[in-house]
Amino acid sequence: MRLSLFLALLLGLAAVGTANADPLPFERGSWARLNTAHAGQPTVIHFWGLTCAPCLVEMPHWAALRKARPDMRLVLIAADPVPQDPERLDAALARFGLDATESWAFTDRFYERLRYEIDPAWAGELPRTVMIDRDGKATVLPGVADLAQVRQWLDAQSKSQ
Amino acid sequence: MRPIFALAALVLFGSTAAAQHQHGKPGSTPQAFTATPAFGPDGTLWVVRPNVDRIVVQRSSDLGKTFAAPVTVTPEPMNLDWGPDARARIAVDRKGQLVVTFGTFQDKNFNGRAFFARSSDGTTFTKPRPLTSDTTSQRFEVAGVDPDGRVFAAWLDKRNVAKARTAGKAYAGAALAYAWENGDADFGNTAIALDNTCECCRLGVAFAGAGRPAVVFRNIFPGSVRDHGVITFRDPTTPGPVRRVSVDDWKIEACPHHGPSLAIAPDGSYHVAWFTDGTARKGLFHARADSADAPYSQPRPLSAASRQPSRPYLLASGPALHLVWKEFDGDKVAVRWQASHDSGRQWSAARTVAETSDASDHPLLVADRQRVYLSWLTRNEGYRLIPLGDQP
């Protein structure tokens, strides 16, 4: 584990930079840890996958939004139903220019449990975006996200600050 | 990492830190985890399984209690399709001849190649050959033996995607392609039954009669609505119209990786089970139609969406219909089972027939004469063939 990441999580800091590192292994309990680490901070969590063609089309738009909105706390979770090689995931993220974004990847093939922890009613379809506000209220955008909606949500978060 | 931090990290994150060290293995290729059964006319159980980069077939003459040494179908290592709804399959004809189908990946963009291999007795297999000569991409291949003993194969094919791209046109999804066996050794010409189906879900095949296959698939209806359709062939080379099973209105530009199942009962009634996350309904459903051309009934929910119901499988055995699926209670995955003895109008209460606490393949049903079995591969328990009675 990268020292910077460890410290950031330990101290609950905002920027969790893992430049050029493999995605963190997302396992049983990871969802709760991730939520604790970002509690009280509006966070956009985007689920994608290497095995999901629409996701790969969508990712450059997330990269552009991230550039345009430095106020967006973005977390990426690769949720391929069959866990993918972390090096390939990292290479894809680097290609999109998203390798400095906090990033996780499913590593447990018992994906029913991982998904259950995130949302029991999520059947695993990708992409999927979950926006969690300061009070922990989640807004789910299934499928390819309407980024205008994400921008509006970000605007609303900064207003309510 | 400095020792003091390593210690603190372990205390704080438990297995996360440990797993981080283990998982960085370079080039770890995902592997398929499936086992697919078929019974021969003499009661032999055949199971086909991917084994890393090979396809193997095992036979059992005692209903899965013991298996003979595996026979390798693929002489050379192959880059097997490990997609979550992909599956090596096996079909047995009335003479006991076997057809194995499986898919490989041609590249890192999930372009597939569908293969078949045949055997007269399961001791040796012909060298695997592609189901079709077109090299663009084929996935989700499935073969079935019609009532006359002729082998029909269907798959999702991307040749028309490539053609459209060359012509500068858009093409959503893939095409439903099919071919019939041409003698014992080969498959004949490929034809396209329908363009613009969803591209990442398994197909279901049943037969309405000799030369009359029926295929259920996730279609792309106008507006990128990915609901289910059934095509029944009028004759071996004439696919009929798409009959929509249900208007779930699942509009999504995404990969559900979650295909349907189809059974046709002896009275000619059609039965489909499927997963949807549409605006009209969410979860797992069953519907019936009196015939190929009759409208489908109101969808019947099989479970609560919050229990992650998934991977339904239907089987008609004699006059009975059997239906299984998986669901998750937050701790264990259970296979639930229902049966119907009135053409799918009324169903027994669902009962759990098997459970597991780790990763599992889709539950499948297989029949030997009129005895029905659940076939299920799980990481903890391995392969199981579990006899089901007449009803739960």
Image (cartoon, helix red, strand yellow):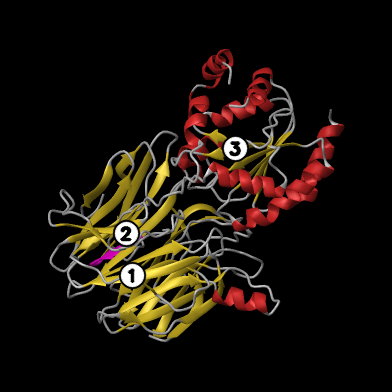
Which quarter shows the N terminus of chain B?
Answer: top right
Q: Position of residue B328 (x, y in %)?
A: 42, 40
Tell me the subunit letter for badge 3.
Answer: A
Q: Amino acid at mark 3?
A: Pro
Tell me the subunit letter for badge 1.
Answer: B
Give the image quarter of residue A77.
top right
* Mark 1, secondary structure of its residue: loop
**Mark 3–mark 1 CB contact (< 8 Å):** no
Give the image quarter of residue B167.
bottom right
Q: Position of residue B382 (x, y in %)?
A: 28, 44
Disc on res. B55: 2
Question: What residue lies at 26% left-to-right and 47% top-to-bottom?
Answer: B383
* Residue at numbered disc 3: A23
Q: Amino acid at mark 1?
A: Pro
Q: Is residue B351 above or below residue B152?
A: above
Along the viewing direction, whichever of B73 and B15 lies nearer the viewer: B73
Residue B180 falls left or right of residue B158? left
Disc on res. B128: 1
Q: Are marks 3 and 1 on the same chain?
A: no
Residue B202 falls left or right of residue A60? left
For the residue carrying disc 3, how many other residues have a C-alpha within 10 Å: few (<14), some (14-19), or many (20+)? many
**Marker count (numbered):** 3
Mark sitting earlier along the chain (1/2): 2
Give the image quarter of residue A72.
top right
Res B294 seen here: no
Q: Are marks 1 and 2 on the same chain?
A: yes
